[in-house]
Amino acid sequence: MPAEPPEPPADKPLATKTTKDCISIVWPGTTYDGGAPVIGYKVEMCEDGQNKWTILSKDVFSTGFAVKNVKEGKKYKFRVSCINTKGTSKPSKVSDAIAAVEAAGDEVDEEDEPDEKAFEPRKIAAKKGNIKEEYDIREELGKGKFGTVNKCVEKKTKKMLAAKFIKIEKEADRKEVDHEVRIMQLLQHPKLLQLYDLYSAGKNMCLVLEYVSGGELFDRVISDEFELTEKEVTFFMRQICEGVKFMHTQKVLHLDMKPENILCIRKNSNKIKIIDFGLAQIYKPGLSVSCGTPEFYAPEIVTYDPVAYTTDMWSVGVICYILLSGFSPFVGDDEGETLSNIQEGEWDFDDECFDEISDPAKDFIENLLTLEQDERLEASEALEHDWLKKEMKSAKALSKGRLKKYVIKKRWLKAFNAVRAMIRVKCVI
Ligand code: PIT
């Protein structure tokens, strides 16, 4: 089926915080992306009581927006449209009238879970029935090589969860899912997305997962409401290292650590969870793999040499480098050049953006982007590094321009590859 413009956001925008001159709003994703991923949003505003809509932006890349320069005391309504490569959706339902007044931020997520642990550890046994008997399936949260993830609600408990649907084309696919499930059962930790339930019916499998509503970490970081400082980056890196440390104590290697696999638990929270254990492996001496995402490959992946726990830590170093600078340290003009840069350990802090980065931050990265696996920091050692160990006092806002470009480029590439994959499928049919 050819792609078409998406459906509007699933519900009206909501205010998260208001001041006398700024209103911050958020909205949910689309209920149907039209067959091509949503790559942005159009945000419109109308003064309460009037019928004249003004476009505030046509290129918002996250599901939140800070509307600046509103008039104190005045009330405004908002509506949002989803954009994919095929066009723009109809506008969402109109928000309530929101006044520009000084007020505390409200948690807008339906679920109020101050505890980071989503639920008690569970023993998972695959169910044969139809998932829809026990769960209401709601809007799509994401789509990728792994399948489609939808929000869902357990009917019995009203618990908000996420359902990852996987099509089983061949027996090997089922083995892969079983492997992921076994790995996830070893990974019960607040920084790792938890498995709640499992369905297996013929060619369809579904993992019911913990629900987080904050979206990808990098999308949060580039949003207008977020101020990026080194202190914030240490907060994220500490949590990432804690999650990775736990995985490694369980002898599990993630093997696909990258920004897409780090989600924020709530829209206005800096707490994260690591997702996607689809490529994870139990460590065995001599294990070599050829999987993951080239930009984040450690040198031993490029050369198909045995991996180590520090293979994940190399990728953590790449994520940290990008967060601080917006540059991907090894990316070349093509994949060959990227792999060669990695193999040669060809990277530096030469760009002037590193002038504003502290020495401990640079030392942290240097100790991760080290060709020799044994010389790289393990996750537990990274947590003991001065940069993460000492709470930073204040830090100056880092420029986010390049990071924005990086995230937007990735989004376009993802959309482009999805369309290309669809064209390929059509050619086969
Ligand atoms: C969300 C919200 C949420 C879960 C996900 C996405 C899940 C993503 C996911 C999990 C995997 C995987 C791939 C993607 O292999 O609560 O927006 O195990």
Image (spheres, rainbow, N blue to C red):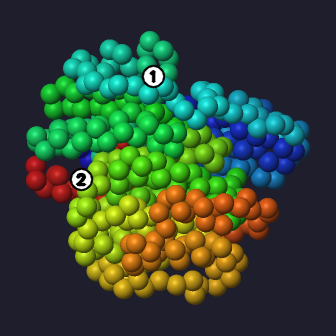
Amino acid at the residue labelled 1: Val
**Residue at 57% over, 51% down:** 239
Mark 1 closeness class: few <14, some 14–19, many ≥20 residues within 10 Å? many
Placement of 45 over or under 344, stated as above or below = above
Q: Position of residue 408 (x, y in %)?
A: 50, 63
Asked if marks 1 and 2 touch (Cβ < 8 Å), the reply is: no
**Residue at 60% over, 61% down:** 384
| Kind of element beneath mark 2 | helix
**Residue at 79% over, 61% down:** 393
- Residue 149, by quadrant, is top left
Q: Position of residue 315 (x, y in %)?
A: 43, 65
For residue 82, side relative to residue 140 (left or right): right
Q: Is residue 87 visible?
A: no
**Residue at 35% over, 35% down:** 185
Q: Which residue is mark 1?
A: 153
Q: Which residue is mark 2?
A: 422
For residue 269, side relative to residue 193 (left or right): right
Mark 2 closeness class: few <14, some 14–19, many ≥20 residues within 10 Å? some
